[in-house]
Amino acid sequence: MAGEGTPVTADKDTINRDEAAQAVAIKRYGTEIGEAVRRAVAEAGLPPEPANYGKGKGRDLPGFGMHDGIEACEVAGEPRLRAHGCVLAKVWYEKGQDALGRIYCYVDPAKYMAYNPDVKMIHTRCVPDGDAFCELAVRSTTPEDRKRFRGDGPDWITVDAP
């Protein structure tokens, strides 16, 4: 865990107060990105649909993080992206901070839900969780996902559950 402190319940796991604050901060950062992407997409005259994410003149950030390679695949009929060699996962691992690195991964669902609250990008596999690669899927959100995301607490991270 990324620091000591009193446990905080976030439905997905019990996390300490430092991690809870980090999860809230990551949501703010992801929200900033998602809102900027949504504005750029709207300025390009496009609807905020998953296929339009990143179109237009928005932030100059990698669309799917920094990796050695990305591949499209399909799992049980669902389109997914597999990211191999995540640079950030390597950094967190080298620092012995996989848990902190995993909290950073929540930026993906946050930016997608800020872009369009009806969709989220989730990790079906994640290197800081012990997987060999990250696997991402775009899925519809539930009313509970949207409620948690609108809240102020760390329990919004449950939207990343596969």
Image (spheres, rainbow, N blue to C red):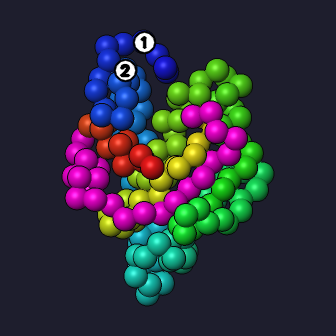
Q: Amino acid at mark 2?
A: Asn
Residue found at x 71% / y 25%: 94
* Whole-number angstrom distance, CA of label 1 to CA of label 2: 7 Å
Residue lying farthest to the front in this orientation:
76
- Determine which residue is flagged by label 1: 4
Give the residue number, with chain letter if any, for mark 2: 16
At x 52%, y 43%, the residue is 105
Q: Write down the region rendered in magenta.
A: 129-152
**Is 91 one of the magenta-colored residues?**
no
Circles 1, 2 touching at the beta carbon (< 8 Å): yes
Kind of residue at badge 1 = Glu
| Residue beneath the point at 70% across and 41% down | 132
Identify which residue, 147 or 31, lies in the foreground.
147
Depth check: give the residue in front, 62 or 69: 69
> Which numbered circle lies on residue 23?
none
Res 150 seen here: no
Give the residue furthest to the right.
68
The residue carrying pointer 1 sits among few (fewer than 14), some (14 to 19) or many (20 or more) residues within 10 Å by Cα, namely few
Q: Is residue 125 visible?
A: yes
Residue 18, quarter of the rendered image = top left
Secondary structure at badge 1 equals loop
Which image quarter: residue 21?
A: top left
Q: x%, y% of residue 57? A: 55, 74
Q: Is residue 13 above or below residue 141?
A: above
Q: Residue at x 52, y 60 (%)?
A: 137
Residue 146 in magenta stretch: yes
